[in-house]
Image (cartoon, rainbow, N blue to C red):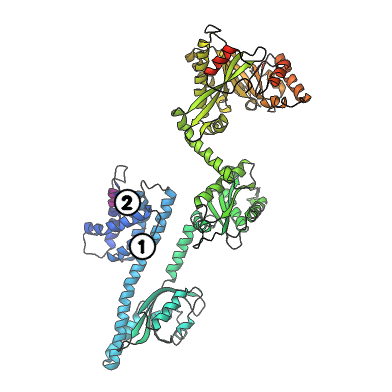
């Protein structure tokens, strides 16, 4: 339905809420004023619409969400005489197009949630409109019916003309009218009621109301009926279904009134029936569309959260049932979409949905699609993790077979996060977050599997997410600092240099080591600015050490080792940034050693090695860190621009055993001999005892670092070690 275009001057950022609300009212008034029978001016009419619009706006943003105000707004339209059918359609069109635009500002809700709320408000508004219009019609019709009965009695006493008028009104009424005695026997029905029941008068007249029971009748329906025929109430209204003669179901809005004789004694029942079957079917269809996925037909996120909230909420008396949730994400679905197209991807999702539905057919089980390639299976019939794990196994088994689409056989794999537990302990959002985190654990473990939720793993993942979010501003706030661990000559125990190790002084978690945040910095791209900051600070500190070293007269060889991440190796400004940092600090390139892990250089081509060669030609030492943990060929050492091998601490750990494993010893001797033959220096990490240091010195290692010499610490401790030549 066409609604007026947005007036000039859209809802700008500087408009206040009241200004945006009045613009919304203006659009609404322009839409329905032409089809409204009223003596008001347009300005006066818009004044009547303003409180109705405020009801809709407040309901859109209300917490908790409630659609009752929208029903009152729909009823308010009827009160304003907007009873033309086109008035409702235009009003719903305005609400659909403009309510979120003009009233959805600064609400803290996402756009998807606002649109879903807006849709539900439209349904409620239509319901309120229909109810108010029905009440208005019912009141008019009941008044007519009462008048007709009174006219009939008067006609029996006096005038035949009154009987004729009664019959005309009774038979011509737009709603079904029936009269029964207090025993429930139907005495009179009009043509409308007969048509509602299938057109067979004999099926209605002469029957007894007690025969009109339907399985969906609530217990209150017949309780109200008994109270009315006993004279304890004058009227009741219910929504009640009936069976027609052909077995189909007629849904009605039923109003039953008690008619008394001249002495006030109950005499008859007067029933007014409005056929709402089509409206009910429309409501059910709209409800279905609002709660089910259009592609797969599965329940969508809205319906799933309704069911999940019931499942995780304790009963009214505090009883706690159990629930289980399987959160599924398809592995590699994006590749199928990108390579074969979204049409194939959609057909694949439909097939996956069918297979998932076959896995959850028992009582209390449901499958829903949250969006994209994410599905969930919920069960409220579980005695523990084993039952939900069984459901997860059935899902993986159902996905294991290939899916044929357009002559192709596509293999589907999935990763599942499984959560099981008692109701009343977690909110729906907490349960879904735990399932999501667990699903990603299954995906990172290789996929095509499920993992059970682990509160400790959830806490780590939440902490990891918090650290990732805080990283970008941590560098700006100066929360990072550097500690230095000495590199010691094994032959004389003098300090050769120090390795710069970055730390994060987190406001909540305290001091964090690089293993906690460097991988996060790699993932977010912050490793490049962070790495440049570490290089600047370390080079500046190395120059400061040289100027302070009394043994060398301010020109000592004390150098600093700085780690390079794989991302930094690929950065195009690696060489330029390094040269700039050295020149600004006035440090000779020979006092800087850049450490690169062996795994980062596995399969490295010349494009990757070129920046390292340029730095090596300038005099910067390149150290191959964690050597011995990768799978590179030792022969590749000849083509790598490295001058130092740093043996991984796993070699020194083996030397703590007594007696020392001769195989480990031979391996270290071989690596040292090979390195020296290639004119490479050898540094050993993780030295913790004097025996280790002595054995490594005998083998011929050049330098070492570890807790035996010093733990990482402030830069001034390096100067103390130089003075003492301490071992």
Q: Earlier in the sequence, mark 2 or mark 1?
A: 2
Magenta segment range?
A: 18-23
Q: Is residue 574 above or below residue 136?
A: above
Q: Is residue 229 above or below residue 97?
A: below
Image quarter of the C terminus: top right
Q: Relative to the observer, which residue lies in front, 696 or 526?
A: 696
Q: Is residue 144 above or below residue 495?
A: below
Q: Residues within 10 Å of mark 2 (few under 14, many from 20)?
A: few
Q: Circle 2 sits on which residue?
A: 5
Image quarter of the N terminus: bottom left
Q: Circle 1 sits on which residue?
A: 71
What separation in Å lies between label 2 and label 1 (alpha carbons)? Answer: 26 Å
The spot of residue 430 in percent (x, y) is 51, 49
Circles 2, 1 touching at the beta carbon (< 8 Å): no
The spot of residue 299 in percent (x, y) is 53, 57
Furthest residue in direction top, as rendered: 553
The label nearer to you, 2 versus 1, is 1
Q: Relative to the observer, which residue lies in front, 697 or 202?
A: 697
Q: Could you say whether the residue bearing mark 2 is in a helix, strand or loop?
A: loop
Q: Relative to the observer, which residue lies in front, 321 or 713?
A: 713
Q: Is residue 591 magenta?
A: no
Task: Tell me, yes or no, if residue 677 can be seen here.
Answer: yes
The spot of residue 515 in percent (x, y) is 58, 31
Residue 277's quadrant in the figure? bottom left
């Amino acid at each position: 339905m066409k609604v007026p275009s947005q007036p000039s001057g859209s809802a700008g950022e500087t408009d206040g809420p009241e200004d945006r609300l009045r613009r919304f009212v203006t659009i609404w008034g322009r839409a329905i004023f032409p089809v409204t029978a009223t003596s008001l001016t347009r300005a006066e009419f818009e004044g009547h619409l303003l409180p109705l619009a405020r009801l809709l706006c407040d309901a859109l943003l209300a917490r908790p969400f409630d659609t009752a105000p929208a029903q009152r707004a729909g009823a308010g339209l009827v009160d304003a005489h907007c009873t033309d059918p086109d008035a409702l359609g235009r009003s719903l069109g305005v609400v659909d197009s403009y309510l979120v635009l003009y009233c959805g500002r600064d609400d803290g809700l996402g756009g998807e949630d606002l649109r879903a709320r807006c849709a539900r408000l439209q349904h409620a508004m239509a319901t309120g409109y229909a109810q108010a219009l029905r009440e208005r019609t019912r009141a008019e019709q009941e008044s007519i019916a009462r008048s007709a009965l009174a006219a009939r009695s008067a006609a029996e006493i006096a005038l035949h003309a009154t009987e004729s008028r009664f019959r005309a009104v009774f038979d011509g009424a737009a709603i079904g009218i029936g009269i029964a005695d207090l025993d429930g026997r139907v005495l009179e029905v009009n043509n409308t009621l007969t048509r509602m029941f299938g057109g067979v008068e004999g099926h209605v007249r002469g029957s007894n109301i007690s025969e009109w029971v339907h399985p969906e009748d609530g217990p209150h329906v017949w309780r109200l009926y008994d109270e009315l025929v006993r004279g304890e109430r004058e009227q009741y209204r219910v929504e009640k279904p009936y069976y027609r003669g052909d077995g189909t179901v007629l849904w009605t809005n039923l109003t039953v009134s008690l008619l008394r004789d001249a002495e006030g004694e109950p005499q008859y029942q007067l029933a007014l029936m409005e056929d709402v079957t089509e409206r009910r079917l429309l409501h059910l269809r709209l409800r279905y569309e609002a709660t089910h996925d259009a592609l797969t037909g599965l329940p969508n996120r809205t319906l799933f959260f309704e069911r999940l909230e019931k499942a995780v909420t304790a009963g009214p008396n505090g009883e706690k049932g159990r629930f289980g949730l399987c959160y599924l994400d398809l592995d590699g679905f994006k590749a199928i979409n990108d390579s074969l197209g979204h049409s194939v991807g959609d057909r694949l999702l439909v097939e996956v949905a069918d297979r998932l539905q076959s896995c959850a057919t028992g009582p209390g089980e449901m499958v829903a699609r949250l969006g994209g390639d994410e599905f969930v299976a919920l069960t409220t019939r579980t005695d523990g993790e084993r039952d939900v794990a069984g459901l997860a196994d059935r899902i993986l088994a159902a996905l294991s077979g290939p899916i044929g689409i357009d002559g192709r056989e596509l293999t589907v794999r999935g990763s599942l996060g499984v959560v099981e537990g008692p109701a009343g302990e977690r909110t729906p959002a907490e349960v879904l977050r735990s399932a999501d985190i667990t699903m990603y654990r299954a995906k990172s473990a290789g996929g095509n599997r499920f993992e059970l939720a682990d509160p400790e793993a959830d806490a780590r993942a939440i902490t990891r997410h918090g650290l990732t979010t805080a990283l970008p501003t941590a560098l700006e706030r100066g929360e990072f600092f550097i500690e230095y661990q000495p590199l010691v000559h094994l032959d004389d125990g003098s300090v050769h240099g120090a390795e710069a190790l970055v730390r994060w002084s987190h406001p909540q978690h305290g001091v964090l080591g690089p293993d906690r945040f460097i991988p996060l910095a790699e993932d977010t791209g912050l490793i490049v600015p962070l790495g440049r900051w570490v290089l600047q600070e370390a080079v500046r500190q190395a120059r400061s050490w040289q100027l302070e070293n009394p043994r060398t007269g301010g020109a000592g060889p004390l150098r600093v080792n700085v780690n390079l991440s794989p991302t930094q190796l690929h950065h195009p400004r690696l060489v330029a940034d390094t040269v700039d940092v050295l020149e600004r600090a006035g440090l000779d390139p020979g006092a800087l050693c850049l450490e690169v892990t062996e795994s980062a250089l596995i399969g490295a081509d010349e494009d990757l090695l070129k920046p390292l060669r340029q730095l090596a030609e300038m005099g910067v030492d390149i150290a191959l860190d964690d050597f011995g943990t990768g799978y590179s060929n030792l022969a590749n050492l000849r083509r790598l621009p490295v001058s130092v091998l740093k043996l991984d601490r796993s070699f020194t750990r083996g030397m703590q055993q007594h007696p020392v494993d001769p195989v480990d010893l031979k391996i270290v001797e071989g690596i040292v001999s090979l390195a020296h033959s290639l004119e490479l220096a050898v540094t050993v990490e993780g030295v913790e005892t004097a025996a280790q240091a002595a054995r490594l010195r005998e083998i011929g290692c050049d330098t070492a670092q570890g807790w035996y010499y010093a733990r990482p610490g402030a830069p001034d401790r390096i100067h103390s070690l130089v003075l003492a030549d301490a071992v």
